[in-house]
Image: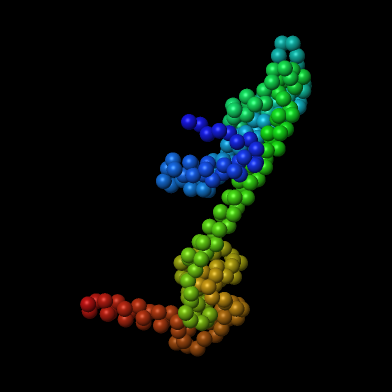
Amino acid sequence: MREKLITTLKEYKETYSLRLENHISKYEDYDEVHFINNELYLYQNCFSTANVIERRILEYNEDYDGYRNCYLNDFEFDEMNNEESTGRENYTVKDLIKNESKFLTDGYDLEICNQLTTSFLKIKSFLESKLLELESNGQKEMHTDKTLNWIGNQTDLMELIKALIENGNIEIKKGEQGKTIEIFSNFFNFPIKNPNKLIADLKIRNVESETLFLDQLKKSLFNYITREKKK
């Protein structure tokens, strides 16, 4: 059974949770983001159906060749101009706005059209705010989940980052090394102050001290492998 089309923001807010619950129950991988994107598509179509305004079109036929003004919604206007629409007319909305007695406006009740487009825009704004909130919370959760705590000093971390960059393990564009270092800093939840100086210090290290931290990593991994082989 098709869900009732909600045409006012007040009623939409009141029924949002129930509509969301019904949507999620249809398939196990549906979530609120999927629901909102579906609703945005629906209400964009509703808006475009109700957005009836006087438009100037070019018409060719046996009796007339030239421009004329008529009342069309967005889909009808696209069709008249042979343009492909990204959505489709909502027939429930079409039934609400059609009134054959309104012959001066090509059978459309412009007052109802105005009421509906106003409400549909408000519903869309409500949904977009919900989506933005969800995406923002998702980014925060992602950041929290993927954040590790670096145990060590910033010189060691910089040595690791620079080694990965120079070895080609991390692809960066010219001039974006600083941005890459900042990403690592955030990922490891460890501030890297004055990275340019740290890199400069790496360049002037004494002979056989160039890769102190990497040598320590190599030794630790070698010891681990050796222990595991003995088990």
**Residue drawn at 26 percent across, 76 percent down:** 228
Whether residue 83 is visible, yes or no, is no
* Residue 72 quadrant: top right
Q: Residue at x 51, y 48 (%)?
A: 32
Extreme residue toward the left, this view? 231
Which of 39 and 164 lies nearest the eye of the viewer? Answer: 39
In front of the other: 180 or 35:
35
- Is residue 224 depicted above or below 3 in this figure? below
Q: Image point 49% across, 44% down: which residue?
A: 21
Where does the image place residue 134, in percent across and percent down from the top left?
Answer: 56, 54
| Residue 205 visible in image | yes
The location of residue 35, given as percent across then percent down, is 52, 44
Residue 224: horizontal and vertical position, in percent? Answer: 31, 78
The number of discs equals: 0
The residue drawn where x is 53% and y is 57% is 138
The scheme the figure's colours follow is: rainbow
Q: Quadrant of the C terminus?
A: bottom left
The answer to which of 4 and 138 lies nearer the viewer is 4
Among all residues in the image, which is located at the extreme top?
62
Question: Which of the 4 image quarters holds residue 181?
Answer: bottom right
Q: Position of residue 186 (x, y in %)?
A: 55, 70
In which quadrant of the rendered view does residue 49 lie? top right
